[in-house]
Amino acid sequence: MEKKCLIELKCIEKEFDGEQVLKGISLSIRNREFVTLLGPSGCGKTTTLRIIGGFESPTSGDVLFEGRRLNDIPPYKREINTVFQRYALFPHLDVAENIAFGLRLRKLGEQEIQTKVRTMLELVGLRGFERRKVTSLSGGQQQRVAIARALVMQPRVLLLDEPLGALDLKLRKDMQLELKKIQQSTGITFIYVTHDQEEALTMSDTVVVMNHGIIQQIGSPTDIYNEPVNAFVADFIGESNILDGVMVRDELVRFCGRSFECVDKGFGEQTPVDVVIRPEDIKLTFPGDALLQGVVESIVFKGVHYEMMIRTEHFTFMVHSTLAEPVGKTVGLSVVPFHIHIMHKTEAAQ
Amino acid sequence: MKKYMAYPYGVWMLIFIIAPILLVVYYAFTDKSGALTLGNFTSMLSYTSIFGRSFLLAFAATVVCLLLGYPLAYIMSKQPPRWQNFYMMLIMLPMWMNFLLRTYAWMSILENNGFINQFLQNIGVIRLLNTLLRPEAPIEYLPLINTGGAVVLGMVYNFLPFMVLPIYNVLIKIDKKLIEAAQDLGAPSGAVFRKVIFPLSMPGVIAGITMVFVPAVSTFVISKTLGGGKEMLIGDLIDLQFMGNAYNPQLGSAIALVMMALVFLCMLIMNRFDDGSGEEGGLLL
Ligand SMILES: Nc1ncnc2c1ncn2[C@@H]1O[C@H](COP(=O)(O)OP(=O)(O)OP(=O)(O)O)[C@@H](O)[C@H]1O
Ligand SMILES: [Mg+2]
């Protein structure tokens, strides 16, 4: 499978009424890649997508498509199609005509259009829905029509803006698998927007974590999860305990009034840092067997594990464990050095 | 409890809508002595040309209103929101003036020695026309008033807002995302308009046509003042039966009834054009 660079964003900045929404987004996306933009609400995901689609022009910076500058090309001339955040199906057309909309503009023959529409409906599991009014469909069905309408154009790139946002959990999971399957079988490059980290991790080849209009980290789902570059990413990708700490010297960090061994080096001496510990990496022990002691404040059953809040002298830790401890009990908390992640303090992470 | 709230409205409907219609129906089917008859309807046959003329002029006025009103509404809907209210006020402004006054104003503009003709004389256009076109029978003014054209002009002037407003209201409610979706699927701006904006604005167009056509087809003030009363419209004919020297309320009622039926029929046909797309279009019926 050839993997050359298809779309490139170069230092994209975007201002709305003097407010800077994107602050220098640079990103390159390879052919056939499944890229997800992930970040909290308002971080600029939709704006980035709209700039790629051509619905918004960047205040500065370039969008390149196979090396050609795309900035001044109107949306209708781009080999890019979009599945909109709230579907945007044409209410005056039935399901088949919605899907045929772009094909008719290409002046294809009636026979060919019908064939393509039927194939698409089958692909998204809506056989027999041709003549239904789109307003009479359920959210999930409308979603499928929106996907079919974009896919039938056989675009080079498909932009999807939180396409599953309005669906219930079960349907979401099914559609995630289906979308991934469609992406793999068609070989279309997907640029997918979500603020659901689990969705991003399960579907993508590459995850782009954004916050406040700045890219925090680009990497594979495993990289992002195992090696977050800062406290923001660590917190956004799965829950984390984030503490203020001081790097005393290489491989020794001080937080919660104690010194802990760790594996990180190169931060200098007496440097303030963020310390990140994942809830599942904390082991509960007898109080005497650990450096930290705390009292169980609450416990919630989460299906696979229990989630406990444990208050120590300086900080309340979130701990995931398959064993329950009763509320009010004093326990010890221990972490092996490998699981203590040290990160530079960054502005954007605040 | 809610049910009682509707009673005053029911009474109001009964007195001011249902009762007058029943009265019109009663008159239409009786003669002067009160006996049942169809004579009122048969004697109407001699007025078919008036019916034809009324529908023709109203139709012309509606078409002109649509051709002027749609682009106007479209341009208005594209303006920045702050300006839209201002333009809206400009369009409504003439309607704050008395209807009669507005129409009389047009009279003095269109008259043989009115504003336009005086202006044309002063800049020498009339003289030019005379030398160019008809040196043998020179004219002193252009015949503007007392023509079908003047009546249509009066109708367009008075009823244009009724075309603009419903179309504008539908246009501003069209979801911008749909326009983007069309562009996304390869539609240049012309195709976006033809395939998305125009079809979605049909309910407004239907409402506008209805709201212009119905008052235009039944007007009598406009034809009286700008048409000179020499070529009557249905409105004038009915007016004549109730207020004029031809006093004959029975015939007047019959004409009114037939016109109601015809208008109803027109609207029914109109709404068939709108099938599928806009359910709202049918609301006016
Ligand atoms: N047309 C606009 N005019 C002014 N401000 C805008 C416009 N579009 C977006 N913004 C602002 O830009 C910022 C980023 O918006 P954007 O829609 O890209 O966020 P997002 O990451 O997609 O969020 P969400 O997850 O809620 O969809 C927000 O603060 C928003 O208010
Ligand atoms: Mg968004």
Image: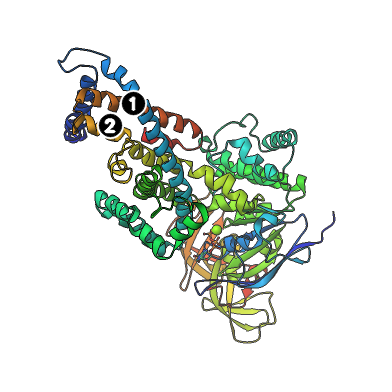
Who's the residue at 40% across and 38% down the image?
B57
Disc 1 is placed on an element classified as helix
Q: Nearer the viewer, residue A201 or A100?
A: A100
Who's the residue at 30% across and 51% down the image?
B107
Kind of residue at disc 1 = Tyr
Q: On the rendered structure, is B140 left or right of B17? A: right
Query: A155 above or below B229?
Result: below
Q: Nearer the viewer, residue B104 or A57?
A: B104
Label 1 sits on residue: B47
Q: On the rendered structure, is A344 left or right of A31? A: left
**Badges 2 and 1: C-beta atoms under 8 Å apart?**
yes
Query: A223 above or below B92?
Result: below
Q: Quadrant of ligand 2?
A: bottom right
**Label 1 chain ID:** B
Kind of residue at disc 2 = Leu
Q: Position of residue B34 (x, y in %)?
A: 16, 15
Q: Position of residue B18 (x, y in %)?
A: 22, 27
